[in-house]
Image (tube, grey):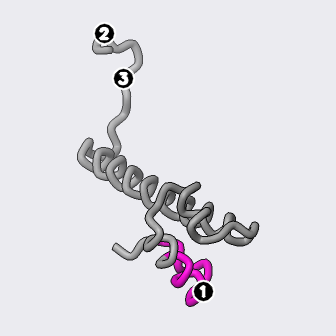
Amino acid sequence: MVGVEQIEIERPVDLSVIETRIRELDADTKKLQKVRDRLQFIRLRYRGYSVPQACNICRISLQTGYNWQDSWNERGMDSLSPNY
């Protein structure tokens, strides 16, 4: 809401710096969600669910599930971050 300012805000950085940081955080949030999704899948596999069952629960394709599992088996926790 725009109105009469009672207490002025200090501006030690340019607005573009703030906007850039917001975009970075949005990207980080999306990346963290992808890591969380992969961990959810791995947790289901640890709990004894088959790959098709875990894929169905996580709503991912069977190929994606096998790709995630192969990456997990090769690199463990390092495999969780997307490579883009």
Q: In the displayed structure, does residue 58 sit left or right of residue 12?
A: right
Please state the horizontal and vertical placement of residue 80, each as a whole percent of the image: 53, 73
Residue closest to the eye, 16 or 25: 25
Disc on res. 73: 1
For the residues labelled 1 and 3, say whether their Cβ atoms are less than 8 Å apart. Answer: no
Give the structural element (helix, strand or loop) at label 3: loop
Instruction: Say which residue label 3 marks.
Output: 8
Give the structural element (helix, strand or loop) at label 1: helix
Please state the horizontal and vertical placement of residue 31, each as a whole percent of the image: 44, 61
Q: In the displayed structure, does residue 14 sit left or right of residue 28?
A: left
Chain part drawn in magenta = 68-81
Of badges 1 and 3, the one in the foreground is 1
Of badges 2 and 3, the one in the foreground is 2
* Quadrant housing the N terminus: top left
Please state the horizontal and vertical placement of residue 4, each as a whole percent of the image: 31, 9
Residue drawn at point x = 59 percent, y = 71 percent: 51
Q: CA distance from mark 2 to mark 3?
A: 10 Å
Disc on res. 4: 2
Q: Amino acid at mark 1?
A: Asn
Q: Is residue 80 above or below residue 24?
A: below
**Outermost residue to the bottom:** 74
Q: CA distance from mark 1 to mark 2?
A: 60 Å
